[in-house]
Image: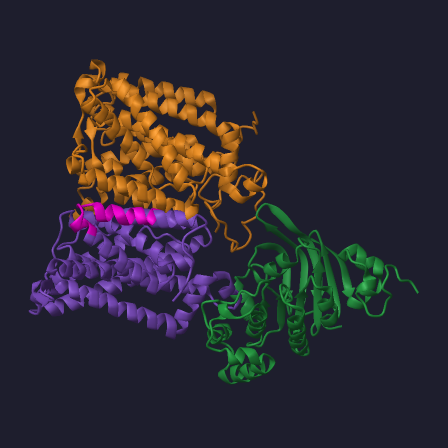
Amino acid sequence: MSTLVLLVATGLGLAGLYFLLAAGLSLIFGLMDVLNLAHGAFFALGGYMAWTTMELLGFIQSVALRFVVALLVAAAAGYLIGVVIERLLIARNYGDHLVQILITLGLGFAGVALLGGLYSYDPRALDQPEWFTQTTTLLGARIPNSRILIFAIAAAILAGLLIFLNRTRHGLVIRAGVENREMVSALGIDVGKSFTLVFGIGGMLAAIGGVLGAVYFNGITPSLGTTQLIFAFIVVVIGGLGSVVGTAIAAVLVALTQQLLNFYAVTGAGDIAVVVLLALVLLARPQGLLGRQAR
Amino acid sequence: MSTPLLRVADLHVNRGDAHVLHGINFSVAERGVTALLGRNGAGKTTTLLALLGLLPGRGSVQLAGEEMLGLPTHDIVTRGIGYVPEDREVFSQLTVEENLRLATRSETTSAEVNDRREVVDGLFPILAERRSQAAGTLSGGQQQMLAIARALLNDNQLLLVDEPSKGLAPAVIADMVNALEQVASHTTILLVEQNLRVAERLATDAVVLDQGTVVFDGTMQQLFGDPELTHAHLGVSGGTMTAKSTTTQGGAS
Amino acid sequence: MNPTPVAAEESSTDSATNPPTAEKEGPGQTAVADRSAASRRMGLGVLVVCAGVLAALPLIDVSIPVVLPGPISSPGSMQILGIGLVFAGLAVSYDLLFGFTGLLSLGHALYFALGVYGTNLLMDVLELPYAVAALIAVVGVATIAAALGALALRARGVAFAMVTLAYAEVFSILVLADPLRISGGEEGLALASAQVPDFLNGVMNSHRRYWLALVFLVVTYAIARAATSSLAGRVWEAVRENEDRVELLGLKPFGFKLLAFTLGCTLAGAGGSVYLLLVRGANPGVAGANFTLALLVMVVLGGAGRLWGAALGGLVYGLLDLRLGALGNSGVLDGLPDWVERVLSEPLFVLGTLFVLLMVFAPGGIAGLADRLIPDRTRGRERP
């Protein structure tokens, strides 16, 4: 029983990571029709930015404080780089989705290789506040606090995203744009600005995911984001394009399935099961991916 | 004579490989309703899309003397164009209230917004009632009202309305026509319609397209007064449409 | 500015005048050469000469510093060039799917990997001679491709891309997790050299393996060229442009797409069995998503929809990938700060950046650039 509780708890932590990666992807694809293949690089970038920040701030005694600052720096970097990339490279190819996708492909390759050149491919561990490695006992299981924190942060971000989408004008434009981009322009609104915003948000979320991922996987490598990306895609497809709530639910489903099957069946079975699930969902609706909802 | 509000000159538009509009010319006078008519596939909706910049085109489109062709859609629209698309295209996941809020442009002051909201609420009380409902749950007729309401929230010089009667029951059409009539009294409208009764009721002028060219540009009276013209361009006998003429074709006096 | 490599006399889409807002499903016009296959085929004479030159390379003793580790005819260089040729053929096979038919398959590497692993396992476990093992493996790949394709092609566009990606991922996971204990997991498999004929084994026969790779490229190119000039090829291009229109014309796109898919994947499988000999083993890296994406880069780099472009892209990619690391050791970059040198020695950094620049400024790839530089390349509108 306690094993089950532990698996569920760590599964929820993993779900938090998937949500952070997938939410950005979902909005970007839902609004812009761009399959962002560079998303994994943002994830890794976040982890490395955090690592470097913590190194530079080594003079600060409190690891927890350094970690918080590192997280914020990574988030900001993810946002800014997302905005710059969208403005410089993606926006000029408005309408040609294939070229946009290919550009993200090249950026993904270059980004990961850049990080590999700068930091080498060996995993780098983040300094973690002691509290992370301690456990909390819940229902007889000893759950690492870091997992709980990751889930909590992801949940807080989910709430923040929902408030943003449902209560601000920018959010309103994005929700409408996910449904019908052209009509939004026909109302006199510059959809391009929303594209930039969404790409920036996506980068920011992925970067935060990377910092937390470095905690979850006990180290960051340049290709960590890319290997997790396939699962993020699965979450996006199952959750429904442009739907933040859908992404959250799907993230939990996918992560728990993976964790439980990998443990109770055989290693790798969980991974294969969710990938097969992706294929099945896609094939059940051969006319295209799941309908767009922006909520 | 005053300059026309909208002047279209030598407009060519392609859709994919097909050359749909072959250098059309027409103008829309300020005030009143001009109907853009023609059979299916004549290029009516394509014309509207090109005016809005949603389709690329070559030639010239001038709104109140300013060239619009080539500008991005949102720029064109903020110069004062309201659009009521074919098939409504309301945002089904957003509430009625949100749909209206989205349509309010930033140049419109909040005082003006309030005034216009009042007018809209007066025209379409049903919408006011269903303010917090998701637009996707509205009936076809109600969605049409919402689509029209959207276009009324800003100070628009020109309204482009595309087949507002499409898919609506006759009783609902009557309501919709009333609403448009009230709007037409102080705004210029370019109305694309297949339903000739509606067109006749609302419009004073008419432009007829056939296979991407303009084949008639004049008043509704001229068009429907001459049964041969009506038949040739619109494929119906003029006689059945106007209350004045006899019921059989070629009802010459 | 709109970077559309449009051949004015052939294109009737006038998208160059205004910011295009009407969006189409399927590959954008800019990344794929706009002219029909017939009018942009590389002349047969040119191709024969190229093949001849390539065949003669093992006889040349010249050194090209940095680009190759030793004289052209040395085993090291022969291996690198051989791999380049296999990549070229592989890129051609992918071009059939992506460049001509517009199928964005993100799992092409799977079939290549099946060729590599399959051939080796047949030799190892069943002790079949190389030629027989390779043949059976290719037939196996064809069957699997047809089956998987029939399923995947029920989806279109990005959905199709993701299904194919899913396939490749499953295979990759299986290879690494190795439940049946046959794939060697992370370490891969060593070549079952006992089953390889003597004339292809050993360091001194590196030039023979090179020639085998050349044979693979030539055969693949010939098949691809014949297929794309045929009626099927014409339908593929029509499907790429506008699949709905093809249906309206009364043709069933599904069968044609499946044909392109199966053919391309089978050729990739054949490439795998040749690659096995060149690298002397099976490595799980060939099954990864990274490699398929690399294929996409190869094809677009060279020019999607142009066979010679794809081949060239494959060759260039292969050389860059294998030799960029040597750049760091060569002393050319010594003046630069350490971290710059390390980053520039990462092949994927250079390739990725190059690719992005290419997409921004010349989406037609190398072939697209050639089109623009050589003004009158029209070979006449040959319609067989």
Residue A80 shows in this picture: no
Give residue B123's quadrant in the image: bottom right
Residue C341 in percent (x, y) is at: 19, 44
Q: How is the image coloured?
A: by chain
Q: Is residue A275 located in the magenta-colored stretch of the structure? A: yes
Residue C188 in percent (x, y) is at: 17, 33
Chain B shade in the render: green
Q: Which residues are magenta?
A: A261-279
Q: Main secondary structure of the magenta part?
A: helix
Nearest to the observer: residue A209 or residue C363:
A209
Residue ranking furthest to the front:
A1
Query: Which residue occupies 62% across, 56% down?
Result: B46
Chain A shade in the render: purple
Nearest to the observer: residue A276 or residue C20:
A276
Residue ranking furthest to the right:
B253
Give residue C150's quadrant in the image: top left
Chain letter for orange, please: C
Residue C371 in percent (x, y) is at: 47, 36
Query: Which residue occupies 22% across, 14% down?
Result: C199
Query: Which residue occupies 17% across, 18% down?
Result: C194
Q: Is residue C106 located in the magenta-colored stretch of the structure? A: no
